[in-house]
Amino acid sequence: MVRGRGHHTDNIRGMGRTSVSMQIEKIILYSHRGESREVAFKIGGLNILTGASKTGKSAIIDIIDYCLGRGECHVADGVIRKYVGWYGLMLRVADGRVFIARRNPAIGEKSSGDVYLERGGSGDGPAFAALVKNMTVSALEKFVGATLGISENKHQPQAFTREPLEANARHALLFCFQDQNDIDSKIRLFHRQGEDFMSQAIKDTLPYFLGAIDEERLLKQSQLEQAAKALRQLERQKRDAEAVDDSNFPRARVLFEEGKQTGLIDERAQATSYEALLEILQAVAHDDRVRDDLIVGDGEDTLAALRLERQGLRGELERVNADIRSARLFSSETTGYEREAKEQRARLSSVGLLQGDGASVAHCPLCETPLVSPMPTIVEINESLSELGQQLEAVQAENPRLQARLASLQAEQGAVDAKLRENQELIKERVRENEILKGQQDGFVLRARTIGKIVQYLETASHRKAGSSLDRQIDAARARVAALEAELDLETVKERIDGYLNIIGRYMTDYSSALDLEHVGSQLRLDIRNLTVVADTLDGPVPLYRMGSGENWVGYHVLAHLALHKWFRQKERPVPAFLLFDQPSQAHYPAERDAEGSLSVLADEDQAAVHKLFKLIADTCAELSPSLQVIVMDHADINADWFKSAVVERWRGRKLIPEEWQREL
């Protein structure tokens, strides 16, 4: 039995026994063929999974971590990665059950985006055929955080040395795992502490998980910003009111003259007293007609439309000009053809000098000289002459219509030119009008600015009259800011963290009395700044890395995490209510000495050390039951009733992956 812990036990036993904050009911693995393998755990107590090496015990932490949203699957390559299709996790949460499954990444891949989530159910787990993606990994992470009850939070580093960090479910899980590389480290106290940026993330988020940071801190931070802004406005109003005017009210007179210059006040208006000036200024400030006059039309739209019309007219003119050029070219070609045809007809008409149509075509008709090439007959020449005459008549018939088309195009050209000239005049006129409008707009801007000055002056003048009321508002605003700053004070947070760590340190000190560790009897504490365990001795503080032997490193890891989870459960913090230890006996019972789990092969002092370590874990689970679940994977198999009752499976000749799965797929 653990000694010296009785005065803390009642606090734990009195807290909500019926509530469960995320514990593991079972792991379900599915083969590629759809076969399933379950490893069931007891809720709210100690679970021991004992067995030989290379049976898959160390993969349990990686499987759970992957199912709860880790970006990459860190299950080692080998039998598990080869034969498992989906990893499944049945969780018991406050309002029932949740089943989460993730597809095993394909060969060569580090992760899979396929996530299946099912709420409720009998606890048997879904069939293999039902495992289809219905959620993303990022949505899974948010779901786990919401299920744990992680509220909106943010750690803002001092002096803005790095980006703000919001604690989430992935950070909470860092306090729930101690794999065989974590548990005997003298340098790293927490899971994944040695990874890039992870150490700082643990330091930044642990105060939130301890409860040292108010759950409503973000809301109060926003309220402080709003209160500070309101205070600055009131203080500015007071400064303006105190400097509003002296006995000669020069500011009021300046505004009065500025109103005349901008046309807001009649140039003939006179004011011989401060009250008269205020009356005139108030009339300007409350005259809706003045504000209506400040609305100025925008002539740019009309100008843009005219320019768009000009662009269209220019395109139309270019088209007409192209048609005119084509018509003129065609007319020119027709005229040339007509001239050539007339000349050819005149030449052929000389055939009329010849008589008859039976003359020899092989001799010259004039001198009867034989011809090398026979000449056309008179009949053939006459036929050619007739055909040429018909073509000439057709060309002459088309010529008037071509001229009419050309005249029509020229008329259209003139009309488009006229529209372009009209458009250009309209554009010039609109540009002139826009310049006038711009001048008016500049004047209206000056008038609007003057009205703003007058309104502000009148407000400060009214505050001056109600000076005592303004002072009371400022005092109340300052008190509000001071109260919020006190609630958000970093020193207050630091004092709260130190107080909580002192209590956790007492838990650690009490637990250490059950183990034969170095510096037993010294006050232990959790050093959140360096993320280690420190023993305060008469010779000074001794951190974990200066303590010798693996027995001390393992022992202090175990008792530190037990103490932390006792605090988490006592304060009902949003951290999973399970804690996993992998090979806590390794300092005394390494794998190569495993003899079917029996401790008889160990020296008496080693047997006693292993026995005490497991008994501490068992007693702490009993103390915190049913609020905490502890799962231990180890070689040791202690021959004691309390140990045997905690064993959920023995992997001696049995493994995580059944032999029948390893048949050829």
Image: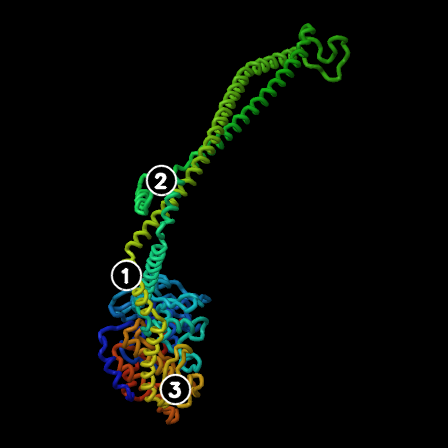
Question: Separation of disc 2 and disc 1 at Cα?
Answer: 37 Å
Q: Residue at x 32, y 51 (%)?
A: 459
Q: Please state which amino acid type lies under the numbered disc 1.
A: Arg
Q: Given this view, does label 3 or label 1 mark the residue nearer the observer? A: 1
Q: Residue 195, located in which quarter of the rendered image? A: bottom left
Q: Please state which amino acid type lies under the numbered disc 2.
A: Ile
Foreground of the two, 629 or 130: 629
Q: Secondary structure at mark 3?
A: strand
Location of mark 1 (residue): 472
Task: Specify which label sits upstream in the sequence, 3 or 1.
Answer: 1
Q: Residue at x 41, y 82 (%)?
A: 184
Quarter of the rendering occupied by the C terminus: bottom left
Q: Given this view, does label 2 or label 1 mark the residue nearer the observer? A: 2
Location of mark 2 (residue): 265
Q: Residue 369, located in which quarter of the rendered image? A: top right
Check disc 2: other Cα within 10 Å, few if <14, some if 14-19, many if 20+: some
Q: Vertical placement of 417 versus 388: above or below?
A: below
Question: Separation of disc 3 and disc 1 at Cα?
Answer: 53 Å
Q: How is the image coloured?
A: rainbow
Q: Secondary structure at mark 2?
A: loop
Q: Vertical placement of 181 versus 126: above or below?
A: below
Quarter of the rendering occupied by the N terminus: bottom left
Is 247 on the left-hand or right-hand side of 622? right
Location of mark 3 (residue): 536
